[in-house]
Image (cartoon, rainbow, N blue to C red):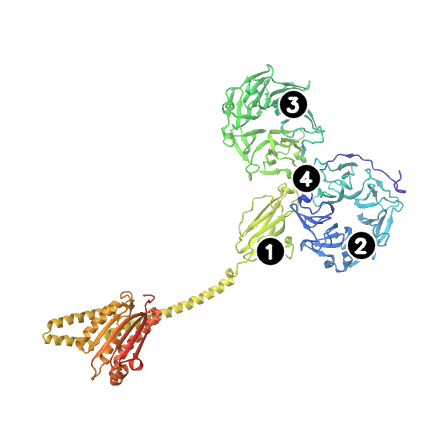
Amino acid sequence: MRLLLSMILMVISLSIKGQEFLFENYSSEQGLSQNSCYTIAQDDLGFMWFGTQDGLNRYDGKEFKVYHPQNTEGNKLPSNYISALHFDQTNKQLWIGTIRGTCLYDTAGDSLLLITEKYPYASLLLGVAPKKISSFNEDEFWIVSFNNGLLHINTKTKKITSYFNDVSNRARVTSITMLNGKIIVSLLNKLFWFEPQTSGYKPIPVMESHKFPEIRELYATDSTLWIGTITAGCFSVNDPLRKDAVPLAFSMEPVGVGSFITDANKKLWIGTRGSGILHYDPVTRKTTRSSHNKYDKRTPGKNFVLSMYADRQGIIWCGLSGSGIAKYDPLKYQFQIISNEPTNEFSLPDNMIFEIYKSREGEYYVGSQGSGMLKWDITSNRFISFPGFQKPGAAINTVYDIDEDDEGNLWIASWGGLIKFNRKLNQLQFDTEQDLLQARKLYSIIKLQNKDSLFITGENGPIFYDLKEKQWKPCPTNPMQENTYIGRYVYEDEKNILWICTVGGGLIRYDPKQSQFRVLESVRKHTFYVRHLFPNGSLQWLSTDNGILIYDPRKDSVLQTIKPNPSTNSNVCYAVLEDNNGQFWTSTNTGLYKINRKSNNIQHYNLGNGLSFLEYNTACCYRDTDGSLLFGGVGGITRFNPTQIKPNNFSPPPLLTSIRVNEKPLRTERSLYFTENLSFKYNQNFITIYFAVNNFSNHTNNRFTYRLKGLTDNWSEPDNENIATYTSLPPGEYTFELRSSNSDGKWSNEMTRLGIMIHPPWWKTWWFWLAALIILGTLISYFVVKRIKKIRNEATLKQKITETEMMALRSQMNPHFVFNSLNSIQEMILNNENQEASRYLSKFAQLIRITLDQSSHSFVSLRNTIDYLERYIEMEKIRNRHFSSHITVDQELDLDDTLLPPMLIQPFIENAIWHGITQHSKEITVNVHFKKEGAHFVSTIEDDGIGFIRSMEEKKNMQRLHQSVGIENVKERIRLLNEKYNIQSNILIADKSMIPAAKSSGTIVTIRLPLQIPEI
């Protein structure tokens, strides 16, 4: 058949088989901005980049970060339609092509750049829509555009060269690649080789005699050029520059081919535009297909492939039209899952599996919950049901255990009773015993090695079944029936001892020679529930609800307890097997665990490793002769060969992706990956750190551990959470340290570190404390000096007050007053006025005592003051009978609560009596009045003598001396009291002649004191 004019065809003969590749799918449900992915790239940090019709996406294994012209991260994107991506390893920048121009992403700055910000001479690219961006040499980039031909950018010479930019060809350039060091470019129907020239390249047509169907994509593998077309599949040609080069048509449907990629096994992946993904093995020349199956989520989401990319781990990413991304991880689905397939009538009909058994002749049988026993062709994965188990809901449909007798018959322990399967006749025979409880609800069965008998356990205890007599035989008295211990699995050792794994009794030993059952308390003290036993030399590995117990039957001792998942509350182990590498595998409620006895390393396998279910069933396991292990559970059967499981050796260091401070995103000048230190204010101490590790193989099983040195030296418990939060961090220097491990538990060699400084508030800084200490020292010195000065002043003041009080006392006790008083009393005695002399002598003595007593107090009550004045006046009247006196007190004053300094009033009364009279006027009246004026106590001493002005003139010398001792002393006392107690007291002496309203001569003395004096 002629293909488009004169093309010579050599068709590769191949057969396309069913799919062997399983995928993970990502779409907008996982955060992708849009579900048509046109281009894919990976940067130097390992982030995956996906260009869609509506935004650029960066994926870190945890989440998609979307760059869009309408958001802050992507505001420099020329358009939301991303058409091409290429990462420049030399300059560490991502070239981003959109339908409205090109821009760059700088990994160091974690930011987008306009193309002219990095390359000012490249303004032409602002308006060019790239279809493909490639680079084959350092400093050289090629852009296949939609409508501007082919552009060559030389960043070293700062030159842009256009090819095929004429009107007829500018929209016809489709792809570019490099084959054996030669650049090959395709137009719609033609191929060109770009020959290097001194000043650039020269396009040279190749294979001119062949007109291809419309070419979509070019791809080079070794020496072969692959050509994908829009409608006619694809072609291959070895060394297209040879004159005799002939394109070979690849045998496939006539569909479009839009992308190629080569995997780690050198298989060629062909992405079609409607027929899924083809996988071509150039060695075997066979092809398999991966296509969408709506019943299997592990198949590609759509059959229309837009782009493909192989990352640094060998993972293949496929961009699909309308369903996002399909990811093929060669380490993901290494476990074969046998389960029900709705469209396959020969698939496993019931996913709840209780038993996996292989007969001596190599036939496989499966015990299920609702479909009875099934025969399994393990090669084709076809299951055959037996008519006897087809009655829905029948108790016999629940099969827990299978064993084989010496004649090749299978014996089945079912919930409905004992069943015999004659393999020769392909016939089921059901036991008809109805009255024996032990013959119903059976869990385990074993054909005894040296007896023609079965040992069976069930809901109602153990029992024997004699194969010759076909009769049930009771067991000796045993703790299983007495305590309702339920046997779930039985193992017979080389000494014919039966080891019974029970629910409630732990492990029970039965010695048939002695017909004796014994509960092993050494095991039971660890757990009441033992589900399976695996013999390992002289030891026994027990699967229990408290992990794996390694039991030594010779010593009747548990040597070790292994808890596969100590971080959770569940340590139920259903079964355990040893593989050919000497490592042990146990099935649990959370998947499978591999235990390395030598290193004590435990590796977990779960949904992230390709398991389709996590919960397994009691004692449901089998180790095949080829080393394969089989475990049955709630989702079917898991089958794998441990020696063929590929390890995950790739474990890159983790990366910090973002930080939030006080619940707000932190913006940094440089990318966090290249930031060594961050500093914050004292109130920016609520910090949340987000991180990831760009390891996309079984990525859900990546683990992180971290610590904040300076706060704690303890590492966090490893888990897959990628957030670390610290609240109310005190000021200080910290180092955040982060480590990650891959799905195999291999930790990264490098540790990620970030220095964090929380600055103290200004009042906690060293310079503030230094200044505060200086100020405090100065203040202390100031107050100490001031205090010393105050103490000195107070001492001086106290001394002065004491001196004035002594002066007041002396004024009271002056020799003139004492002499005259005693002389008057003596005169009374000489005149035989003994009684009167005795009375006055007593009053004189009381006055002297009161004077001495009041002199020891700073303040005395008004009552005591009045009493003292009355006694003094009475004594003065002995000497001078020419005066009269009156003392009055306002009712508002409290005589006991009103206080005033002692000996304050008396000098003014004395002064009025002795200096207010003359030779011509010897009669005088002295009035003393105490009253309250607001918050003050006022004392007024008024006389009608000659006044102090006239008195000073007549008795100038004597008066001056007396006043200086008496009245001046009182004034000094008032001044000192004001200073000591911080009060406002005063004395006012007025001559009546100076008062216009006065009707007589004399003197008025007014003393004003506060009613409340502090510190008394």
Q: Secondary structure at mark 3?
A: loop
Q: Identify the mark nearer the N-term, 4 or 2.
A: 2
In which quadrant of the rendered image does the C terminus lie?
Answer: bottom left
Residue annotated with mark 3: 391
Q: Secondary structure at mark 1?
A: strand
Is residue 187 something one can see in this rendering? yes
Q: Identify the mark nearer the N-term, 3 or 4.
A: 4
Tell whether label 3 touches label 2 (CB within 8 Å).
no
Depicted 35 relative to depicted 383: above or below = below
Marker disc for residue 151:
2
Residue annotated with mark 1: 677
In which quadrant of the rendered image does the N terminus lie?
Answer: top right
Kind of residue sitting beneath label 3: Lys
Image position, residue 974 (x, y; %): 31, 73
> What distance separates the C-alpha of mark 4 from that of mark 1?
37 Å
Q: Nearer the viewer, mark 1 or mark 2?
A: 2
Q: Secondary structure at mark 2?
A: strand
Q: Nearer the viewer, mark 3 or mark 1?
A: 3
Q: Identify the mark nearer the N-term, 4 or 1.
A: 4
